[in-house]
């Protein structure tokens, strides 16, 4: 079996801030969590500055940029306010995501095909500021093609439907979603896009998806913060890193279940 390049792990620290904000004050600190994750093997840190500031706040983003020693990925809606904030802070990357106030978490991929007129200027402004843009999308051919059309260099495939199907024990649906992710990753690479993936991943699903050579980065947050309650954040990140490295060897089944 051919050797594939290493796969990167981005750790999302949003829900460290969720716990902090539940009581107020400064503990636990998402910046401190980011530093622990990096020490344990994370290749970068992701944080989503939402319009309602429900978890990560503006000062968190500024401190992350100033204090961490790895790339910062700024998740954000494609609004004028967020684009201006990202340009002011200057992260390594910005991932444009759909955002609704009523949602508990991001519920699906960005409709790039239907929002070209909004997204193309946002991508251009961020790119001009030296910020690498990714678009969080479902693995649908028309969305992948639209991402290339608006000149985004990176996509992040939404893996939530596949993870949910596996959790529900729905083998038919999980197999269908796995094939869709795999085909989408292949199409994106042929289109010249860098391919990331994320949402709902755990140790098993991350190990499985890491076997797809087109995917070069996984972004994982809620699961790792949950695991940190039991094992500690450093231990959870190390275990995730090990699972992804095993998966990179290609040990998966056709339905995406790691062997």
Image (spheres, rainbow, N blue to C red):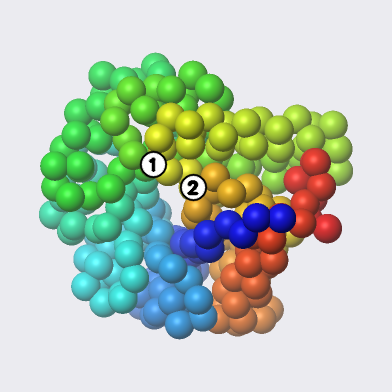
Q: Position of residue 86 (x, y in %)?
A: 21, 51
Residue shown at 40%/59% (left/top)?
46
In the picture of the structure, the residue carrying the numbered disc 2 is 196
Q: Residues within 10 Å of mark 1 (few under 14, many from 20)?
A: many
Residue 78 location, x and y as percent?
Answer: 29, 36
Q: Is residue 77 left or right of residue 216?
A: left
Q: Is residue 250 left or right of residue 240?
A: right
Image-quadrant location for residue 204? bottom right
- How far across and how far down the image is residue 154, in percent? 39, 41
The foreground one among 198 and 221 is 198
Viewer can see residue 226: no
Q: Which sits in the foreground, 182 or 157?
A: 182
* Label of residue 154 in the image: 1
Residue at the image point whose x is 56% and y is 34% from the top: 186
Q: How many neighbours does mark 2 have within 10 angstroms: few (below 14), some (14-19), or many (20 or more)? A: many
Q: Are marks 1 and 2 in contact (CB under 8 Å)?
A: yes
Describe the element under mark 1 as helix, strand or loop.
strand
| SS state under label 2 | strand
Dividing the picture into quadrants, the one containing residue 126 is: top left
């Amino acid at each position: 079996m051919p050797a594939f390049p290493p796969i990167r792990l981005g750790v999302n620290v949003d829900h460290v801030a969720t716990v902090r904000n539940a009581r107020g004050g400064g503990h636990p600190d998402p910046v401190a969590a980011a530093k622990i994750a990096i020490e344990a093997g994370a290749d970068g840190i992701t944080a989503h500055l939402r319009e309602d500031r429900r978890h990560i706040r503006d000062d968190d983003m500024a401190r992350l940029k100033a204090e961490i020693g790895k790339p910062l990925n700024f998740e954000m809606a494609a609004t004028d306010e967020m684009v201006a904030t990202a340009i002011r802070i200057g992260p390594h990357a910005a991932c444009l995501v759909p955002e609704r106030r009523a949602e508990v978490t991001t519920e699906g991929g960005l409709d790039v095909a239907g929002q070209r007129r909004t997204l193309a200027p946002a991508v251009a402004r961020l790119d001009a500021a030296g910020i690498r843009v990714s678009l969080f999308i479902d693995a649908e051919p028309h969305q992948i093609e639209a991402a290339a059309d608006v000149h985004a260099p990176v996509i992040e495939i939404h893996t939530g439907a596949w993870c949910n199907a596996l959790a529900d024990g729905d083998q038919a649906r999980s197999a269908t979603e796995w094939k869709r992710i795999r085909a989408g990753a292949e199409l994106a690479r042929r289109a010249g896009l860098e391919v990331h993936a994320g949402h709902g991943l755990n140790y098993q699903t991350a190990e499985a998806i890491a076997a797809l050579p087109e995917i070069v980065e996984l972004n994982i947050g809620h699961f790792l913060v949950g695991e940190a309650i039991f094992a500690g954040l450093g231990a959870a990140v190390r275990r995730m890193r090990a699972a992804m490295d095993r998966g990179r060897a290609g040990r998966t089944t056709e339905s995406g279940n790691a062997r």
